[in-house]
Image: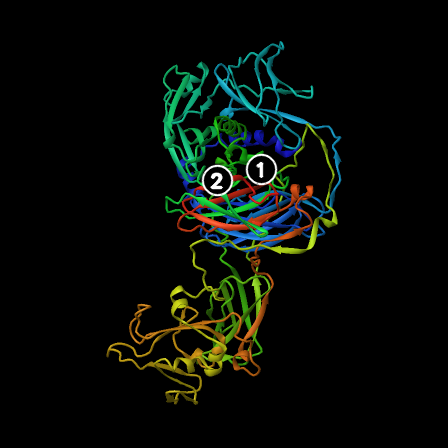
Amino acid sequence: MRLFLLLWTTLLLSNFAFSQKTPSELPEDANAKYFEIPRESLYVHLNKSTYVLGDQIWFKGYAYDRKNRLPSLRTKNFNIELFNKEGKEVYSSLHLGEDGKTSGTIKIDSTWSSGNYYLRISTNWMNNFIEDDSYTQKIKIINQKIVKQDITQEIAYDFKLLPEGGHIVSGTDNTIGFKLINDRGYGVSFDEAYIVDQQNTKIISFRSNAFGMGKFTIHPDPEKKYEAIVKLKNGKEVRTTFPSIAPKGISMSINNLFDDSIVIELNTNPNTSKDIEQKEYYLLIRQNGESRKVAVSFLSNQYKKTIHIGRKELFEGVNIITLFKDKTPVLERLLFNSITKINTNEVLITSSKAEKDSLSFTIAIDKKKEIQYDMSISVLPEYTKAYEHDDNIISALMLKNHLKGFVENPKYYFTNVDREKSYDLDLLLITQGWSKYSWHNIFTYQPKIRYDFNYGITVKGKLQNTRDHDIDKIYLFPTKHSASKIIDLDSTRNSFVITDFYPEKNEIVKLSAIKSNGRFAKTGVYLQVQPNRFKKSFSATIPSKIDVNNIVLDDVDIPDYFFNSEIQKLDKVEISAVKKQENLSNIFIPDYVKKRSKEITEQDARSYPNVLDYISTKGFRVRYGSSENGNAVSTTPQGEVTIISTRLVSALGSNSPQVFLDGVLLSNYDILFNFRTEEVERIFIDRTGSITGLRGAGTIEIYTRKIPLGGYKTGSKVRSTVSKHKIKDGFEPKKEFYNPEYSSFSDPLFIDYGTIHWQPEITFNKKGKSTFKIPDTSLKNIKFFIEGIGSDGSLVSKVYTVRNVNAN
């Protein structure tokens, strides 16, 4: 029998076995310490769940700070892995995050066979904890063809009886949860079942919900033996022995369907009453590191204790309610308390107009509150078979991260929520077992920070081919995602370390050695990227589903003509009332510099070969080397640079400006000795300090290019001092979404498995509206799958079907 069939029994036994020991620490204190190190949860929104060869997997990752219930803004490095059904890694990549989100794409390899795959997203920080907080999403890949399967093996069934709280006590009322699952771990519904005694007398009859779950109440007689009989829809029977009935103890039953409170009922029998009189019992309600305590006392001959707890006293989401005797857990029950931060009606998509071969849509969101929303949208044909995800962002961040084991179709409980679905969610939590965060671990294990939040990658470098020991620093030129840095050199080892570095995979980085006099020096540089990622093994916890009503799966054959060889580029998001910004190559230039600075042109570079030549024309006396320069003849030693303002400065003030190179304040100007103007993208000069607020002799800010103006020129002194290196193990480059060009939008294969559009980022204007375009497929209706999170932690999960105004 598969391991997950024994999940609930194992959980109960392990927790009750631990309850025989008496911890030294109060449970609430131990719980607070266990969650003292903050934890995060992840969700990844995939544009589809089924992909065919020729597709790309497009995704958007979200990180959630569980302690503050907000987006996890600290996370920068996201690990993405893809595993086949055997648990073998077939793809791995590193993705850069910003403000708790990341996005990217995976090209489907032609060597990957048809079948189920598992995409896992994780962070390095998660390795600090025993529990696995990574997030896994199952997908299917079709490589040309899937042949129909005739499932002929006998399907096995397992019927579990699970007492609410963990105990069945004789002579009192007990609530028993139940679940019927097949040997793949999926629930099987039934309409007829009984509890019978040893005389085969029916004591109780019951039926299940759509997931094979339910509950009933029984007052067991210790002198009788009971058995459960389930009659399947195919005529077969499943029989299960009733769990052991304890002669003493306490049972728990919780009513979670009242609007303003929950009702907890603790039941016992005369054999137990004297044992629990005057004993210290209490309920501990916890979520992550927070907890609330409710004292419980039993009077003499009191066999039923009813406790009302207002919903305001509970935490939003999953609450773990444990009955303690002194410091020993006795009963435990998971309960879900409604969430106010679920966005239910504020997102609306409307069709705007048709434009040639594209359609324009407007998405609107209620902006009454100062909340910024981060959303991703997958656009597919109305009757698509390619989007069958069991999860959404709500179920991933509010439910699954508290549970251990497989949960079938968790998004069901958070889609069009009504009283029936709330009841079904309560049944799930009765039958799912104890919490993922066991008291055994809480009392015996203290998490320690062994793995940091990875901020970029670490690169170690070493100088080569140099006998010059006068080098004390390294200058790192800016890259696409990293500003420039001046790095101290370990002179004893001739080595240096670059931290918080964000190069893209195969990006060329440039470095120069700097002498103590500030001049760039010619030397070889060896770089090595340091692995800072802990590789975890993978074991699939998401089983493959068997459709017991239709066990023959039809052929899926993807013909060669499904895709054309060309690809179709789509427009970016267009936001009305937002001014188009200048596309600068250096993202680290502040806005005030962009508006007031000088952009260096090729003419400037020819007129002023050295950047100091340009500075000398802007009200500064510049001296460097032994050459004649503009306003003065230099008498400084070779390599030394001085810059003096011609403005009258107070007697107490310095007459030298503050000079910044890519945002780094220079302690002296010597690094500019051989700095050619062609290496500069923009230069900003504030002589009075009226703009920057830095009074005195003024401010000069220089921002270098990532791509040199016109390339390096033959014989350039700077070129000879620059070392270039390709970073092979960097972050995956961001790619703009593009779609394969389909042969026909009316082809049934496109209707089933085609992609219309993927929008990983939606930016709203001040009125809460955004406009974006998608290709016009002439389909009558189009379906939008929206997932997202607000800056206040509110969650958005919506599915909209919109009529195509340009449909044939």
Q: Is residue 553 left or right of residue 469?
A: right
Colouring chosen for the image of the structure: rainbow
Q: Is residue 553 left or right of residue 127?
A: right
Query: Callout 2: helix, strand or loop?
Result: helix
Q: Is residue 43 left or right of residue 92?
A: left
- Residue wearing tag 2: 444
Q: Quadrant of residue 701?
A: bottom left
Residue 796 % position (x, y): 47, 41
- Residue wearing tag 1: 390
Query: Callout 1: helix, strand or loop?
Result: loop
Residue 555 % position (x, y): 74, 39
Q: Is residue 15 above or below residue 90?
A: above
Task: Looking at the picture, tell me which residue is in the foreground, 750 or 360.
Answer: 360
Q: Residue at x 48, y 19 (%)?
A: 248
Disc 2 packing (10 Å; few <14; some 14–19; many ≥20): few
Q: Amino acid at mark 2?
A: Thr
Q: Nearer the viewer, mark 1 or mark 2?
A: 1
**Whether residue 469 is visible:** no
Q: Amino acid at mark 1?
A: Asp
Disc 1 packing (10 Å; few <14; some 14–19; many ≥20): some
Residue at mark 1 to residue at mark 2: CA–CA distance: 35 Å
